[in-house]
Amino acid sequence: MEKIKKIVFISLGPSLVVFILIVVMLSAVMQTAIGIISQSENNEGVGLMDSLPPWVTPEIILTSLQLQDQYGIYASVTIAQAQQEVGGTWDGTSLYKTASVDYNLFGLKATGGMSEWNGKVTWDGTRGATGTYRKYDTYSQGLKDRARLLLTSSAYSEVADTAVNRRGSQAQLEALSRSPWCENQYHTLNGFMEVYQLKRLDDMTEASYRAQYATGGSTGEFNGNFVYYNQADPKWGSLRYVRGDTIASSGCAATALAMVWATYKGDTSITPATVFALGNGNGALVNGWLSRDGCVNATNSNPEFGCTAVHKLDWQSAYAALDRGGAVMVVGSGNAPFTSGGHWFLIIGYEGNTAYLADPGHRSCTWTQIGGSSNGESLSYIKSRTQDMIIFTPR
């Protein structure tokens, strides 16, 4: 019987081998196809910002791509160097004061450098090498100053050559690693290039980034689709909701919440006049007053509102939500757009140091662009006076 088994196996051997090879080949093809489909599904909806260091904002990306488009200063190398200079850690969760407060991403000193500096200065004793550093009003200003230095200083002529002649990000990274600025830092910089897949930026332009990723606030363009309500509107301004207060006098938070829910649900029957019954019923409001955690719970537990919410004072998360077409509800006190007694309003977009607001207390227009350098007219001022926020992201 054993002999028969062997004879049968031998006689069928070639056919079995061919059959097995076909099965193996088909299996490999199927696994490859499934892997590609799975990878595509896993990457669907994942934006560029999700895989970059947490400190990177759309303003940084957009300005870096502008400099790449115009001058050949590669955005990938820009971000790798900034991570090395001020990121502090490999995951980029901590920034030196010069970067987080003064917008100096590259540790550029105000004195003793390769070029003169007549602008603002700041003292930073947290970097190990203490000194006076350049202080900028925006990240964009600091990025452009770095580009100017690389393109004009004789110390970086090799870097400038890679930019002018578009020799590629790898050549620029190597040249920068041989310069006084980043001498012998190639392996660290290249490590950041690989960890954050920064070379994806090499084939990207400002226009392609805006088209693919910046569909929300980072474009600085308000698309007109955000539902706006004014708390002083005669249709509801005189309604009293708690302690005799009217919506016009004290209903900024409820009005802002009505804007959010009406916008993302696509239901303009939600107004400052109707949001009180809705909010008091689902816990977002308590006797007409905003419950911050209750608002989050009500929003997240009701998918029909079309958005999710989180209650935390975190500007990186706020920027990320705005980049996805979200809104950030902030409260604080101070000069306009705040009030001395405290005021809630919505940030619905931004560009550089300009914020685009849906302010329920604004008296003259459906939305307002706040820009400039004076107190109360800049995003940096809004950030400095914000005491709390609720972040809304479209589902």
Image (cartoon, grey):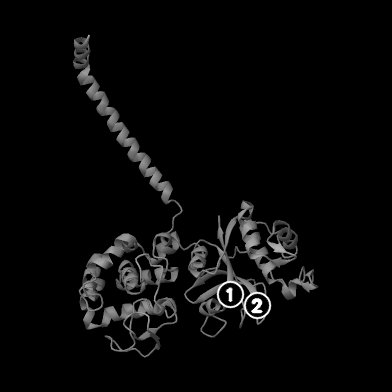
Q: Which mark is drawn over residue 280? A: none
Task: Report if residue 168 is visible in the image.
Answer: no
Q: Position of residue 167 (x, y in %)?
A: 23, 67
In the drawing, does residue 240 fall left or right of residue 358?
Answer: right
Residue under numbered circle 1: 387
In space, the residues marked 2 and 1 are separated at their CA atoms by: 9 Å
Looking at the picture, tell me which residue is in the foreground, 349 or 123.
Answer: 123
Quadrant that contains the C terminus = bottom right
Q: Is residue 239 left or right of residue 152?
A: right
Residue ranking furthest to the bottom: 118
Task: Pinpoint residue 181: horizontal percent, then vertical percent.
Answer: 25, 78
Quadrant containing the N terminus in the rendered view: top left
Give percent across and percent down for residue 215: 49, 62
Residue 57 vertical position relative to residue 194 in the rendered view, above or below: below
Instruction: Classify mark 2: helix, strand or loop.
Output: loop
The local secondary structure at tag 1 comes to strand
Using the rendered image of the protein, determine whether residue 251 is visible from the camera's viewpoint: yes
Q: Amino acid at mark 1?
A: Gln
Instruction: Give the answer, above or below, for where 206 lies relative to 302.
Output: below
Q: Position of residue 22 (x, y in %)?
A: 27, 28
Quarter of image, res 53: bottom left
Type of residue at label 2? Gly
Q: Is residue 97 above or below residue 23?
A: below
Q: Which residue does the numbered mark 2 point to in the structure image?
A: 342
Rate crowding at label 2 as few (under 14), some (14 to 19) or many (20 or more) other CA atoms within 10 Å. Answer: some
Badges 2 and 1: C-beta atoms under 8 Å apart?
A: yes
Seen at 25% across and 73% down, the residue is 164
Image point (77%, 71%), residue name: 234
Residue density around tag 1, few if under 14, some if 14–19, many if 20 or more, within 10 Å: few
